[in-house]
Image (spheres, grey):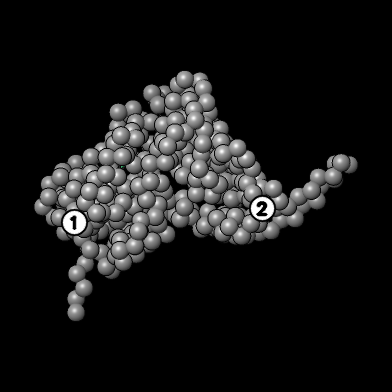
C-alpha cells in the first residue's frame, strides 16, 4: 500500500532553507517537496537547480491556501516569522519555525495561541541543541561529571551574516531583522544556557555597535543569573575573526569545555595548591565533533513530524529565549539589571 506523503511548504528559500530545511525534508522519504514561496527570483532559481519542488509561488499565503501543506517551514527574515507561522497554523499546518520566533513577546504568544487553537505543533530551530558536542555535554552534566554548575560562559561569534551568507543585507535592517547580534546569535546561546544550566532569572547586558556601520548591535555581552547559586555570561558578535567559540561550564567538582573550533568536549578536574602547583586531570568526552548541526535537527524534526511526537524544542523554548533577549535589550537601553518575569 502506498503511504500518503507529508506535504511540505517552505516560506523563504534563502540560505537556511537551502542549508538545513530543504535537504532535511528531501532526505526523508515520508515527505514530498510540495511548494516553495519566495518573492526573490534568484532564491527560487537556486532552489530549483537542486530540489524538485512541485510548485513555486511568490506569496506564501497563496502557497498555503492553494497547496494546503501539512507542514510549513518559516525561513524568512525575522519580521515575517509571526505572520507566516500564524497563517500556516490557521490553515492546518504544523510549523518548523526559525529563530528568533518573533520580534515581540506579544507576537510570540500569538503564535502559541494559534497553535493551541488549531491543535498544531511548532518545532523551533534552536539548532545548537542538535550539535553532537552539545549533546555530549548534556549527557556529561546529567551524569554529574562536574557537580552543580555555578558559573558559565558561552561565546558565539562570526564575521556577520552578510555578505557571504544571507541573500541580501536584511540582517542589518532594524525593520526586517528587529535586532542585531543579540537577537541573531545570543538567542541561540540563551537557549543553550536554559537547556544545559537552568532558567535565567535576571540579566544585565550591553549591546553595542563597535565596528560595523549599521544601525543595530554588532557585539553584545550579557550577564545572566540562574537563581541564586549560578551565574555566567554570554558574548556574541558579528565582527569576529576567530577566537574561542563554544561553551564553558564550571561546576563544584570540575569544568566542562565545549570547544566548537576544536570539535572537542572535555571535563577537567583540577586542584591548585597553596604553593602554586596545579594538578589537572582531563577527561576527553568527545573528539572530532562537528558543526553544523542542521542535519541532526532536521532528521529529528522530520521523524517527529511523521510519527506525531511532541515538538522539541517547542514554542515555549522559543518564547523563553526571546524573553531573555528582549530583557537584555531593555537592560542595555536602561543601563540596569532586569529581573525576568514569567
Ligand atoms: N537556526 C540557525 O542556525 C539559523 C542560521 C541562519 C539563519 N537562521 C534564520 O533563518 C531565517 C532566514 O535567514 P537566512 O539566513 O536564510 O536569510 P536569507 O536572506 O538567505 O533568506 C531569506 C529568504 O526569505 C525570502 N523572503 C523575504 N521575505 C519573504 C516573504 N514575505 N515570504 C517568503 N519569502 C521571503 C528572501 O527572498 C530570501 O530568499 C532568519 O530568521 C534567520 O535568523 C537560522
Instruction: Check the image and name the residue furthest to the top.
Output: 334
Q: Is mark 1 within 8 Å of ligand 1?
A: no
**In x, y percent, where is residue 57?**
15, 48
Q: Position of residue 299 (x, y in %)?
A: 37, 62
Mark yes or no: residue 299 visible.
yes
Q: Earlier in the sequence, mark 1 or mark 2?
A: 1
Spot occupied by residue 42 in the image (x, y as percentages of width and height): 23, 44
Q: Is residue 70 left or right of residue 122?
A: left
Kindly identify which residue carries mark 2.
Answer: 146
| Residue in the picture at 10% in, 52% down | 66
Residue 26: quadrant of the picture: bottom left
* Residue 69: numbered disc: 1
Q: Position of residue 88 (x, y in %)?
A: 21, 48
* Numbered disc total: 2
- Residue name at image x 40 percent, y 52 percent: 313
- Would residue 259 appear left or right of 333 to someone viewing this image? right
Q: Residues within 10 Å of mark 2 (few under 14, many from 20)?
A: many
The one of 248 and 120 positioned closer to us in this rendering:
120
Q: Secondary structure at mark 2?
A: loop
**Residue furthest to the left:** 66
For the N terminus, the image quarter is bottom left
**Looking at the rendered structure, which numbered label has been put on residue 243?**
none
The residue depicted at 30 percent of the width and 63 percent of the height is 308
Q: CA distance from mark 1 to mark 2?
A: 46 Å
Reply above or below: 332 against 54: above
Task: Name the outermost residue toward the right.
Answer: 275
Disc 2 Cβ-to-ligand 1 distance below 8 Å:
no
- Does residue 305 sit above or below 326 in this rendering? below
Q: Residue at x 21, y 58 (%)?
A: 70
Q: Return the residue found at the far bottom.
A: 1
Secondary element under disc 1, as helix, strand or loop, is loop
Amino acid at each position: 500500500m502506498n503511504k500518503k506523503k507529508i506535504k511540505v511548504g517552505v516560506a523563504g528559500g534563502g540560505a537556511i532553507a537551502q542549508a538545513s530545511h530543504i535537504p532535511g525534508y528531501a532526505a526523508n522519504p515520508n515527505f514530498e517537496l510540495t511548494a516553495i514561496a519566495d518573492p526573490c527570483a534568484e532564491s527560487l532559481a537556486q532552489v530549483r537547480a537542486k530540489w524538485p519542488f512541485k510548485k513555486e509561488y511568490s506569496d506564501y499565503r497563496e502557497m498555503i491556501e492553494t497547496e494546503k501543506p501539512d507542514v510549513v517551514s518559516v525561513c524568512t527574515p525575522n519580521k515575517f516569522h509571526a505572520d507566516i507561522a500564524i497563517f500556516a497554523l490557521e490553515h492546518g499546518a504544523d510549523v518548523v519555525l526559525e529563530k528568533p520566533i518573533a520580534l515581540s513577546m506579544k507576537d510570540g504568544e500569538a503564535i502559541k495561541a494559534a497553535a493551541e487553537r488549531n491543535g498544531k505543533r511548532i518545532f523551533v530551530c534552536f539548532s545548537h541543541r542538535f550539535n553532537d558536542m552539545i549533546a555530549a555535554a548534556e549527557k556529561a552534566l546529567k551524569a554529574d561529571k562536574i557537580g552543580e554548575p555555578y558559573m558559565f560562559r558561552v561565546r558565539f561569534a562570526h564575521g556577520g551574516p552578510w555578505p557571504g551568507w544571507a541573500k541580501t543585507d536584511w540582517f542589518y535592517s532594524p525593520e526586517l531583522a528587529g535586532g542585531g547580534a543579540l537577537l541573531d546569535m545570543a538567542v541561540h546561546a540563551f537557549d543553550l544556557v536554559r537547556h544545559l544550566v537552568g532558567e535565567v532569572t535576571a540579566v544585565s547586558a550591553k549591546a553595542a555597535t563597535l565596528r560595523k556601520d549599521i544601525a543595530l548591535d554588532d557585539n553584545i555581552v550579557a550577564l545572566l543569573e540562574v537563581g541564586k547559586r549560578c551565574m555566567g555570561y554570554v558574548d556574541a558578535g558579528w565582527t569576529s575573526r576567530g577566537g574561542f567559540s563554544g561553551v564553558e561550564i564550571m561546576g563544584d567538582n570540575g569544568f566542562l569545555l565545549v570547544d566548537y573550533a576544536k570539535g572537542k568536549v572535555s571535563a577537567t578536574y583540577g586542584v591548585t595548591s597553596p604553593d602554586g602547583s596545579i594538578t589537572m586531570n582531563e577527561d576527553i568526552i568527545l573528539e572530532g565533533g562537528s558543526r553544523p548541526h542542521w542535519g541532526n535537527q532536521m532528521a529529528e524534526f522530520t521523524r517527529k513530524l511523521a510519527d506525531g511526537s511532541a515538538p522539541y524544542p517547542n514554542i515555549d523554548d522559543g518564547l523563553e529565549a526571546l524573553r531573555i533577549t528582549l530583557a537584555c535589550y531593555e537592560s542595555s537601553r536602561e543601563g540596569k539589571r532586569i529581573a525576568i518575569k514569567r
